[in-house]
Amino acid sequence: MVFSSLFFLFAFLPLNLILYYSVKKLTLKNFILIGFSLFFYAWGEPVWITLLIFSATIDFFHGKIIEKNRHNYKAKLALISSIVVNLSLLGLFKYSGFFASNLNWIFQTNLPYYEFGLPIGISFYTFQTLSYTFDVYKGEIPAQKHYHRFLLFVSLFHQLVAGPIVRYQDIAKEIDYREVNVDKFSYGINRFVSGLGKKVLIANTAGDLSRTFLESATGQISVLGAWLGIGLFAIQIYFDFSGYSDMAIGLGRMFGFTYKENFNYPYISRSATEFWRRWHISLGSFFRDYVYIPLGGNKKKPLRNLLVVWFLTGMWHGAHWNFIIWGMFYGCLIILEKGFLLKIFEKIPRFISHGYLLVAALVGWVFFYYTDLNQGLDYLKIMFGIGSHPLYDLNVKLVFVNNLLFISAAILLSTPWPKRLLDKFANHESPLQLSQVAFNAIVLIVSVTYLVGATYNPFLYFRF
């Protein structure tokens, strides 16, 4: 099930809200949320829901063992066991085929292997349960004593399948006690509708336009066409993923949970370092706190630590070499920036460093988009004028001119300027201001109109 589906919007969510607010006792509210969350996941993954429950059960008991034996070796053994079990499951379902096929290629063998279907959201909920056992081991949080409350944390449908990656300590108090008022619920609706509009009206449109270039034969693409195509994909993936995060944050507020922000206008960055402080913030902070710092951070072998983190960042996104190259591409850029580029950027006009980041991001998205490395390299050659490709073609004119208003609006909305303008003139005295209600109604009606004739349109990060 996806948030941007008519069934979710007009059946699942309203029924969940009605039942949730029809009871007063928090325990009943929690069980209603667990039931709806498991149904949400089972809608698309009826088989792998057992894997989700198994992961939650394993780490619930690991947490209890760690807390009970905090001052002896059994706590460390339990932490190691949690890491091994979780990463083994992730490796089995996500990476086993990748490793086996590469071993066959390296040693020229023909070992048989089975390609498991990738359970939706396994990368997200695995990291969430792992962060829980780490935090219990470090003494930052007490172990949860009630299984159903821990299962609620793991299974919450708001962020279950595509993040943000929510740590237990972020919502531990809200699992035990939460309160929703008109302001919070109104804010949740605003964020949810905003995210829906991002996904349906901007991301889906940009994706349709980008395929004109990205899925054409390389001999039919011009230099400007290649830049336009990957630029439209950059718009698509930003509004798709940030739209999902907005919807997740909005849903959380409707039910009394506060999730941290996952995006902060990454395309206004002046460096790759800044870009990754603004893009997929929950993933970056996870690798910082649970990989980079434990390895030594900036104090001990920082170069090695950065390469490990960015190798794992690439691997996390998918079991293909293009994702590893994409991760290492950013790792190398950040190493160069920390070495000397950031000092240069401080002395040059902002538009130059901003231009550098945009070019770097677009090159990175080429690696991200094409799982076939040869296709990706061929596309990059076209972008940089290598070969006998024309500067522009008819598709560039048709797509760019006919959609100039849409492209301009999407670029503008990827910056903080529209929000700053709205905040300046908005009336903050009433959470139910007429202008916001009208805006939400328009976005919802137009989005639903688009969805009526649409086929299944999952979020891009569902496949990671």
Image (cartoon, rainbow, N blue to C red):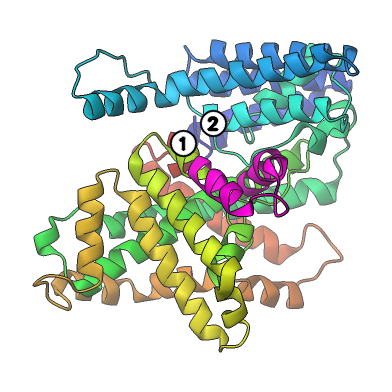
For disc 2, the marked residue is: 123
Left or right of 110 in this view: 21 = right
Q: Relative to residue 300, is residue 316 depicted above or below?
A: above
For disc 1, the marked residue is: 464
| Amino acid type assigned to the residue bearing label 2 in the image | Ser
Foreground of the two, 259 or 25: 259
Q: Position of residue 321 (x, y in %)?
A: 34, 41
The answer to whether one can see residue 33 in this image is: yes
Q: Main secondary structure of the magenta part?
A: helix
The answer to whether one can see residue 414 in this image is: no
Q: Quadrant of residue 61?
A: top right
Q: Mark 2 falls on what kind of element? A: helix
Q: Position of residue 218 (x, y in %)?
A: 14, 59
Q: Relative to residue 394, is residue 196 depicted above or below?
A: above
- Residues packed near mark 2 inside 10 Å, few (<14), some (14 to 19) or many (20 plus): many
Q: Position of residue 402 (x, y in %)?
A: 28, 73
**C-alpha distance separating marks 2 and 1:** 7 Å
> Magenta includes 286?
yes
Q: Relative to residue 297, is residue 228 depicted above or below?
A: below
Q: Which residues are magenta?
A: 283-312
User: Which residue lies at the image location 9% right of the left edge and 61% below the top edge?
Assistant: 219
User: Which residue lies at the image location 19% right of the left edge and 74% below the top edge?
Assistant: 385
| Amino acid type assigned to the residue bearing label 1 in the image | Phe
Which mark identifies residue 126? none
User: Which residue lies at the image location 78% right of the left edge and 45% below the top edge?
Assistant: 185
